[in-house]
């Protein structure tokens, strides 16, 4: 079953042609990687799908329906690339604030927030202000907020970037666990090792164009690095 079908997204920004008829498809239960070079258009694609920016052309189906209704929004969630955090909040307060977006208050919110903090190994830091968190801790608290509504489809923009090897492993393990349980994951990255270790399928965007579409990793013979470089260089 297709959870996300991008039939066409077309976008200019400041007079520049950023996305050129982008299309790809994510099936239920997949761990789907969206690659590759810096400036290729990954973040713009994600923001366009979610309608945070307005493309000139937008033909997207989520859960088999065209458009993004309030009902659809309850079934998805998002973690941005640049995390704009309220640094004067504690980890616990930050997550409670986000729980409020989904109507959770009181005991229900407390339970949810405590469970999430435990899941991302931040229980002991829950009373600390976000300004005191390390980069890895901030990334994990953002991941926790992205799980607050138990999304069926999760959009993550560079979830492992800037983390040390231990932090990356923690985040990857968490994504694999989420994916096994319930959540289809679509994430932007340019870290090949992460793609190799956890993705089922990928698309590659280069200069705003999809140059590899819905490719199963098991169908790639040889090194992933060679495959990417060969495709990027030939376009
Ligand atoms: N607001 C904007 N105005 C003009 N150009 C923009 C704007 N936002 C992004 N761009 C340009 O759009 C292109 C795609 O940017 P985007 O951030 O989507 O790439 P990306 O693949 O996410 O890159 P990265 O790996 O560095 O995160 C880049 O050339 C960028 O300079
Ligand atoms: Mg980006």
Image (cartoon, rainbow, N blue to C red):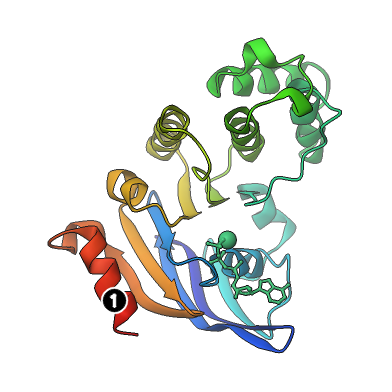
Residue at image location 47% in from the left, 30% down from the top: 167
The local secondary structure at tag 1 comes to helix
* Some atom of ligand 1 lies within 8 Å of the CB belonging to the residue at label 1: no
Q: Quadrant of residue 130?
A: top right
Examine the rendering and report whether any part of residue 109 can be seen.
no
Using a 10 Å C-alpha cutoff, classify the residue at mark 1 as few (fewer than 14 neighbours), some (14 to 19) or many (20 or more): few
Left or right relative to 191: residue 56: right
Q: Residue furthest left?
A: 221
Q: In the displayed structure, would residue 228 be above or below residue 127?
A: below
x and y percentages locating residue 112 in the rendered image = 67, 23
- Measuring 18% from the left and 58% from the top, which residue is drawn there? 223
Residues 164 and 185: in front is 164
Q: Which residue is mark 1?
A: 231
Q: Image quadrant for the N terminus?
A: bottom left
Percent position of residue 174, x then y: 45, 31
Q: Is residue 159 above or below residue 45?
A: above
- In the rendered image, residue 215, in percent from the top left (x then y), is placed at 28, 67
Residue 227 in the image, given as x and y percentages of width and height? 23, 67
Q: In this image, 69 relative to 210: left or right?
A: right
């Amino acid at each position: 079953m297709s959870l996300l079908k991008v039939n066409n997204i077309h976008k200019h920004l400041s007079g520049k042609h950023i996305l050129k008829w982008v299309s790809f498809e994510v099936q239920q239960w997949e761990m789907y990687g969206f690659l590759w070079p810096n400036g290729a258009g990954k973040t713009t694609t994600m923001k366009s799908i979610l309608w945070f920016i307005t493309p000139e052309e937008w033909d997207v189906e989520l859960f088999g329906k065209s458009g993004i209704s309030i009902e659809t929004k309850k079934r998805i969630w998002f973690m941005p690339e640049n995390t704009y955090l309220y640094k004067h909040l504690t980890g616990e307060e930050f997550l409670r604030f986000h729980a409020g977006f989904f109507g959770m208050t009181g005991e229900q919110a407390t339970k949810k927030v405590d469970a999430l903090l435990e899941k991302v190994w931040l229980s002991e830091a829950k009373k600390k202000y976000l300004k005191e968190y390390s980069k890895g801790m901030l990334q994990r608290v953002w991941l926790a907020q992205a799980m607050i509504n138990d999304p069926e489809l999760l959009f993550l923009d560079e979830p492992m970037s800037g983390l040390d090897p231990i932090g990356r492993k923690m985040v990857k393990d968490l994504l694999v666990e989420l994916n096994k349980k319930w959540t289809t994951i679509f994430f932007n990255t340019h870290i090949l090792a992460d793609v190799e270790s956890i993705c089922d399928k990928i698309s590659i965007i280069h200069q705003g164009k999809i140059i590899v579409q819905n490719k199963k990793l098991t169908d790639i013979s040889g090194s992933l690095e060679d495959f990417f470089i060969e495709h990027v260089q030939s376009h």
